[in-house]
Image: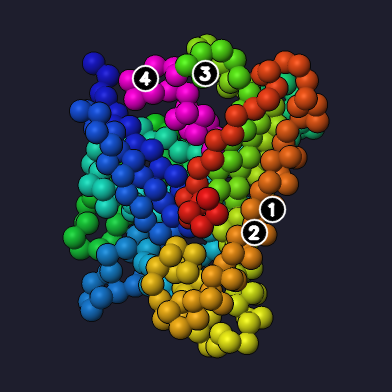
Amino acid sequence: MTEMLLPVCTDEGAGQIKTAIFGADGAITSSIQQSIIAEGAMTEGAFYADGVVETEEGTTFTIDASHESYYDTRTRGYQLSEEIRSLTHYSLLKQGLAGKKLHLYVTLSVENYYLKDSESRDSADRRNQSVIEQKKENLKKSVTFLAPEYKGQQILVEEVTVMPEAIPLVLDAAIDDKGQVVERFRKPVNVVTIDIGANTDDLAYMAVDALNSQIKPIKVLTRHNSYYFLLEKLKHFLESDPSVPSSHISHKVLRAITRGEVNQLAQNHPEAIQKALDKAIHQVARGILSDIEGVLPKSTGATDPRLIPDYYVCGGGGYSPIE
Protein backbone atom coordinates (compact mmCIF):
# COMPACT_ATOMS: atom_id res chain seq x y z
CA MET A 1 0.00 0.00 0.00
CA THR A 2 1.30 3.44 -0.96
CA GLU A 3 1.95 5.60 2.08
CA MET A 4 -0.19 8.72 2.22
CA LEU A 5 1.72 11.99 2.17
CA LEU A 6 0.61 14.92 4.31
CA PRO A 7 -0.45 17.82 2.05
CA VAL A 8 1.08 21.16 3.03
CA CYS A 9 0.83 24.46 1.15
CA THR A 10 3.48 27.16 1.45
CA ASP A 11 3.65 30.61 -0.05
CA GLU A 12 7.34 31.54 0.09
CA GLY A 13 7.07 35.25 -0.39
CA ALA A 14 9.81 37.85 -0.27
CA GLY A 15 8.33 39.25 2.93
CA GLN A 16 6.77 36.21 4.61
CA ILE A 17 6.58 32.42 4.48
CA LYS A 18 2.95 31.36 4.90
CA THR A 19 2.17 27.70 5.64
CA ALA A 20 -1.16 25.83 5.63
CA ILE A 21 -1.50 22.23 6.84
CA PHE A 22 -4.54 20.12 5.92
CA GLY A 23 -5.54 17.70 8.68
CA ALA A 24 -7.37 14.40 8.20
CA ASP A 25 -10.49 15.99 9.69
CA GLY A 26 -10.46 18.77 7.08
CA ALA A 27 -9.22 21.39 9.51
CA ILE A 28 -6.57 23.82 8.27
CA THR A 29 -3.74 25.05 10.50
CA SER A 30 -1.78 28.04 9.25
CA SER A 31 1.27 30.04 10.28
CA ILE A 32 3.26 33.08 9.12
CA GLN A 33 7.01 33.56 9.46
CA GLN A 34 9.08 36.52 8.29
CA SER A 35 11.48 35.78 5.41
CA ILE A 36 14.55 37.07 7.24
CA ILE A 37 17.72 34.99 6.83
CA ALA A 38 21.43 35.74 6.90
CA GLU A 39 24.50 33.65 6.16
CA GLY A 40 26.48 32.49 9.18
CA ALA A 41 25.63 30.90 12.52
CA MET A 42 24.24 32.88 15.46
CA THR A 43 25.00 31.41 18.88
CA GLU A 44 23.43 31.66 22.33
CA GLY A 45 26.21 31.00 24.81
CA ALA A 46 27.95 27.76 23.82
CA PHE A 47 25.08 26.56 21.62
CA TYR A 48 23.66 27.36 18.21
CA ALA A 49 20.62 29.63 18.23
CA ASP A 50 17.12 28.37 17.43
CA GLY A 51 17.13 29.30 13.73
CA VAL A 52 20.58 28.05 12.69
CA VAL A 53 20.54 25.61 9.76
CA GLU A 54 23.03 23.98 7.41
CA THR A 55 22.07 23.10 3.85
CA GLU A 56 22.99 20.00 1.90
CA GLU A 57 25.56 22.15 0.06
CA GLY A 58 27.29 23.01 3.36
CA THR A 59 26.14 26.63 3.77
CA THR A 60 25.16 27.80 7.26
CA PHE A 61 22.33 30.32 7.77
CA THR A 62 20.54 31.87 10.72
CA ILE A 63 16.81 32.59 10.48
CA ASP A 64 16.02 35.37 12.93
CA ALA A 65 13.72 38.39 12.68
CA SER A 66 16.19 40.53 14.65
CA HIS A 67 18.75 40.60 11.82
CA GLU A 68 19.55 44.17 10.74
CA SER A 69 21.44 42.98 7.64
CA TYR A 70 19.99 40.00 5.80
CA TYR A 71 19.59 38.29 2.43
CA ASP A 72 17.64 40.30 -0.15
CA THR A 73 14.75 38.00 -1.04
CA ARG A 74 13.84 40.27 -3.96
CA THR A 75 16.58 38.80 -6.15
CA ARG A 76 15.50 36.78 -9.18
CA GLY A 77 17.41 33.73 -7.94
CA TYR A 78 15.61 33.57 -4.58
CA GLN A 79 12.96 31.08 -5.73
CA LEU A 80 15.61 28.45 -6.52
CA SER A 81 18.03 29.27 -3.68
CA GLU A 82 19.37 27.60 -0.55
CA GLU A 83 17.84 30.51 1.37
CA ILE A 84 14.26 29.75 0.31
CA ARG A 85 14.75 26.05 1.07
CA SER A 86 16.12 26.87 4.53
CA LEU A 87 13.26 29.26 5.30
CA THR A 88 10.64 26.77 4.06
CA HIS A 89 12.06 23.79 5.98
CA TYR A 90 12.41 25.88 9.14
CA SER A 91 8.80 27.05 8.84
CA LEU A 92 7.67 23.43 8.47
CA LEU A 93 9.80 22.42 11.46
CA LYS A 94 8.12 25.06 13.63
CA GLN A 95 4.75 23.60 12.63
CA GLY A 96 5.76 20.23 14.11
CA LEU A 97 6.20 18.47 10.76
CA ALA A 98 9.66 16.97 11.32
CA GLY A 99 9.77 13.28 10.40
CA LYS A 100 6.46 13.36 8.50
CA LYS A 101 6.47 12.63 4.78
CA LEU A 102 5.13 15.68 3.00
CA HIS A 103 3.56 16.61 -0.32
CA LEU A 104 4.45 20.26 -0.63
CA TYR A 105 2.33 22.63 -2.75
CA VAL A 106 4.17 25.81 -3.69
CA THR A 107 3.95 28.63 -6.21
CA LEU A 108 6.08 30.57 -8.66
CA SER A 109 5.44 34.04 -10.00
CA VAL A 110 3.64 33.92 -13.34
CA GLU A 111 6.76 35.47 -14.87
CA ASN A 112 8.85 32.45 -13.78
CA TYR A 113 6.18 29.78 -14.29
CA TYR A 114 5.27 30.59 -17.90
CA LEU A 115 7.50 30.99 -20.92
CA LYS A 116 7.26 34.17 -22.93
CA ASP A 117 5.36 33.81 -26.21
CA SER A 118 8.64 34.08 -28.12
CA GLU A 119 10.17 31.23 -26.06
CA SER A 120 7.25 28.80 -26.23
CA ARG A 121 7.10 26.25 -29.04
CA ASP A 122 3.80 24.82 -27.86
CA SER A 123 0.90 27.26 -27.56
CA ALA A 124 -1.04 24.69 -25.51
CA ASP A 125 1.66 24.31 -22.85
CA ARG A 126 3.62 27.45 -22.02
CA ARG A 127 4.99 26.19 -18.70
CA ASN A 128 8.68 26.77 -18.03
CA GLN A 129 9.43 23.14 -17.15
CA SER A 130 13.12 23.77 -16.50
CA VAL A 131 12.45 26.31 -13.72
CA ILE A 132 9.55 24.27 -12.33
CA GLU A 133 11.72 21.14 -12.01
CA GLN A 134 14.56 23.14 -10.42
CA LYS A 135 12.12 24.48 -7.84
CA LYS A 136 10.92 20.95 -7.02
CA GLU A 137 14.40 19.47 -6.68
CA ASN A 138 15.65 22.37 -4.57
CA LEU A 139 12.90 21.96 -1.97
CA LYS A 140 13.48 18.19 -1.78
CA LYS A 141 17.12 18.65 -0.74
CA SER A 142 17.92 18.35 2.94
CA VAL A 143 18.41 21.01 5.61
CA THR A 144 20.04 20.20 8.96
CA PHE A 145 18.87 22.06 12.07
CA LEU A 146 21.86 22.78 14.33
CA ALA A 147 20.13 24.03 17.51
CA PRO A 148 20.33 21.38 20.29
CA GLU A 149 16.55 21.09 20.66
CA TYR A 150 16.18 20.06 17.01
CA LYS A 151 19.10 17.63 16.81
CA GLY A 152 18.33 14.75 14.44
CA GLN A 153 15.05 16.23 13.20
CA GLN A 154 14.48 16.53 9.45
CA ILE A 155 11.82 17.75 7.05
CA LEU A 156 10.99 15.02 4.53
CA VAL A 157 9.67 16.57 1.32
CA GLU A 158 8.69 13.58 -0.85
CA GLU A 159 6.64 15.34 -3.53
CA VAL A 160 6.37 18.94 -4.73
CA THR A 161 3.59 20.44 -6.85
CA VAL A 162 4.33 23.86 -8.32
CA MET A 163 1.56 26.22 -9.44
CA PRO A 164 1.60 29.75 -10.83
CA GLU A 165 0.56 32.29 -8.20
CA ALA A 166 -2.70 33.01 -10.05
CA ILE A 167 -4.09 29.47 -9.88
CA PRO A 168 -4.82 29.09 -6.12
CA LEU A 169 -6.80 32.33 -6.24
CA VAL A 170 -8.96 31.02 -9.11
CA LEU A 171 -9.51 27.69 -7.35
CA ASP A 172 -10.55 29.49 -4.15
CA ALA A 173 -13.10 31.52 -6.10
CA ALA A 174 -14.42 28.64 -8.24
CA ILE A 175 -14.66 25.81 -5.67
CA ASP A 176 -16.79 25.92 -2.51
CA ASP A 177 -15.98 24.37 0.88
CA LYS A 178 -17.57 21.08 -0.22
CA GLY A 179 -15.41 20.80 -3.34
CA GLN A 180 -18.20 21.77 -5.74
CA VAL A 181 -17.94 24.28 -8.60
CA VAL A 182 -19.87 27.44 -7.69
CA GLU A 183 -22.63 28.73 -9.96
CA ARG A 184 -20.57 31.60 -11.42
CA PHE A 185 -18.00 29.12 -12.80
CA ARG A 186 -20.41 26.52 -14.18
CA LYS A 187 -19.79 27.91 -17.64
CA PRO A 188 -16.51 29.05 -19.22
CA VAL A 189 -15.50 32.49 -17.97
CA ASN A 190 -12.49 34.79 -18.29
CA VAL A 191 -10.99 36.22 -15.10
CA VAL A 192 -8.26 38.60 -14.02
CA THR A 193 -6.32 37.67 -10.87
CA ILE A 194 -4.11 40.09 -8.95
CA ASP A 195 -1.75 38.73 -6.28
CA ILE A 196 -0.16 41.63 -4.37
CA GLY A 197 3.01 40.51 -2.64
CA ALA A 198 5.92 42.05 -0.80
CA ASN A 199 8.15 42.23 -3.87
CA THR A 200 5.99 41.45 -6.89
CA ASP A 201 2.42 41.75 -8.08
CA ASP A 202 1.31 38.86 -10.27
CA LEU A 203 -1.45 39.61 -12.75
CA ALA A 204 -3.04 37.04 -15.02
CA TYR A 205 -5.87 37.14 -17.54
CA MET A 206 -7.13 33.55 -17.85
CA ALA A 207 -9.78 31.45 -19.49
CA VAL A 208 -11.39 29.19 -16.87
CA ASP A 209 -13.48 26.11 -17.62
CA ALA A 210 -13.91 24.81 -14.08
CA LEU A 211 -16.25 21.92 -14.87
CA ASN A 212 -13.59 20.47 -17.18
CA SER A 213 -10.70 21.42 -14.85
CA GLN A 214 -9.11 23.71 -17.42
CA ILE A 215 -7.39 27.01 -16.64
CA LYS A 216 -5.47 28.55 -19.55
CA PRO A 217 -3.40 31.75 -19.37
CA ILE A 218 -4.21 34.32 -22.03
CA LYS A 219 -1.77 36.96 -20.81
CA VAL A 220 0.35 37.16 -17.64
CA LEU A 221 2.46 39.87 -16.07
CA THR A 222 4.72 40.21 -13.04
CA ARG A 223 5.55 43.71 -11.83
CA HIS A 224 8.44 44.35 -9.45
CA ASN A 225 7.29 47.39 -7.50
CA SER A 226 4.64 46.37 -4.98
CA TYR A 227 5.17 46.60 -1.22
CA TYR A 228 8.86 47.47 -1.25
CA PHE A 229 8.05 50.23 -3.71
CA LEU A 230 5.39 51.39 -1.25
CA LEU A 231 8.00 51.55 1.51
CA GLU A 232 10.36 53.54 -0.70
CA LYS A 233 7.62 56.02 -1.59
CA LEU A 234 6.55 56.33 2.05
CA LYS A 235 10.16 57.04 3.05
CA HIS A 236 10.46 59.67 0.30
CA PHE A 237 7.29 61.49 1.33
CA LEU A 238 8.21 61.44 5.04
CA GLU A 239 11.69 62.77 4.30
CA SER A 240 10.07 65.59 2.31
CA ASP A 241 8.06 66.70 5.35
CA PRO A 242 10.12 69.00 7.63
CA SER A 243 7.88 68.22 10.62
CA VAL A 244 9.10 64.59 10.74
CA PRO A 245 12.64 64.09 12.17
CA SER A 246 14.75 62.13 9.71
CA SER A 247 16.33 60.21 12.61
CA HIS A 248 12.95 58.54 13.24
CA ILE A 249 12.51 57.16 9.72
CA SER A 250 13.94 53.65 9.82
CA HIS A 251 12.99 50.61 7.75
CA LYS A 252 11.32 48.97 10.77
CA VAL A 253 9.26 52.10 11.43
CA LEU A 254 8.10 52.24 7.81
CA ARG A 255 6.96 48.61 7.93
CA ALA A 256 5.17 49.24 11.23
CA ILE A 257 3.30 52.18 9.72
CA THR A 258 2.06 50.21 6.72
CA ARG A 259 0.91 47.38 8.97
CA GLY A 260 -1.06 49.76 11.17
CA GLU A 261 1.05 49.08 14.24
CA VAL A 262 1.27 51.72 16.97
CA ASN A 263 4.67 53.41 17.10
CA GLN A 264 6.15 56.62 18.50
CA LEU A 265 6.52 58.28 15.11
CA ALA A 266 2.86 57.82 14.24
CA GLN A 267 1.77 59.12 17.66
CA ASN A 268 3.85 62.28 17.37
CA HIS A 269 3.09 63.05 13.72
CA PRO A 270 -0.26 61.43 12.85
CA GLU A 271 -1.27 63.88 10.11
CA ALA A 272 2.10 63.74 8.35
CA ILE A 273 2.14 59.93 8.58
CA GLN A 274 -1.35 59.52 7.15
CA LYS A 275 -0.71 62.01 4.36
CA ALA A 276 2.53 60.29 3.33
CA LEU A 277 0.94 56.83 3.49
CA ASP A 278 -2.08 57.91 1.42
CA LYS A 279 0.18 59.37 -1.28
CA ALA A 280 2.38 56.25 -1.36
CA ILE A 281 -0.60 53.88 -1.60
CA HIS A 282 -2.12 56.02 -4.33
CA GLN A 283 1.02 55.73 -6.47
CA VAL A 284 1.24 51.96 -6.02
CA ALA A 285 -2.47 51.48 -6.75
CA ARG A 286 -2.17 53.55 -9.93
CA GLY A 287 0.63 51.26 -11.10
CA ILE A 288 -1.46 48.16 -10.43
CA LEU A 289 -4.45 49.58 -12.32
CA SER A 290 -2.21 50.42 -15.26
CA ASP A 291 -0.90 46.87 -15.33
CA ILE A 292 -4.42 45.44 -15.22
CA GLU A 293 -5.12 47.35 -18.42
CA GLY A 294 -1.93 45.83 -19.81
CA VAL A 295 -3.11 42.23 -19.43
CA LEU A 296 -6.62 42.81 -20.80
CA PRO A 297 -7.38 42.32 -24.49
CA LYS A 298 -7.89 45.52 -26.42
CA SER A 299 -11.41 44.55 -27.53
CA THR A 300 -13.19 43.92 -24.21
CA GLY A 301 -16.24 45.62 -25.72
CA ALA A 302 -16.92 42.58 -27.90
CA THR A 303 -20.39 41.04 -27.83
CA ASP A 304 -19.17 37.74 -26.32
CA PRO A 305 -19.88 38.14 -22.56
CA ARG A 306 -17.00 35.80 -21.71
CA LEU A 307 -14.56 38.52 -22.77
CA ILE A 308 -15.70 40.72 -19.88
CA PRO A 309 -13.67 39.39 -16.96
CA ASP A 310 -14.25 39.01 -13.24
CA TYR A 311 -11.54 40.35 -10.93
CA TYR A 312 -10.07 38.51 -7.94
CA VAL A 313 -7.47 40.02 -5.60
CA CYS A 314 -5.35 38.49 -2.83
CA GLY A 315 -1.96 39.06 -1.27
CA GLY A 316 0.35 38.93 1.69
CA GLY A 317 2.72 41.59 2.98
CA GLY A 318 1.74 44.19 0.42
CA TYR A 319 -2.00 43.55 0.29
CA SER A 320 -3.38 45.01 3.52
CA PRO A 321 -2.20 48.62 3.08
CA ILE A 322 -3.32 48.67 -0.56
CA GLU A 323 -6.71 46.93 -0.34
Q: Which residue is mark 3?
A: 185
As measured in the structure, the alpha-carbon distance from the residue carrying label 4 to the one carrying label 3 is 13 Å
Q: Amino acid at mark 3?
A: Phe
Marker disc for residue 282: 2
Identify the residue at horizontal 26%, vertical 48% (top origin): 95
N-terminal label among 2 and 3:
3
Q: Is residue 171 magenta?
A: yes
**179 w.r.t. 31: above or below:** above
Marker disc for residue 286: 1
Marker disc for residue 179: 4
- Helix, strand, or loop for circle 3? helix
Q: Amino acid at mark 2?
A: His
- Helix, strand, or loop for circle 4? loop
- Helix, strand, or loop for circle 2? helix
Q: Which residues are magenta?
A: 165-182
Q: Picture coordinates of residue 17 (x, y %)?
A: 41, 51
Q: Picture coordinates of residue 161 (x, y %)?
A: 45, 31
Identify the residue at horizontal 67%, vertical 59% (top origin): 283
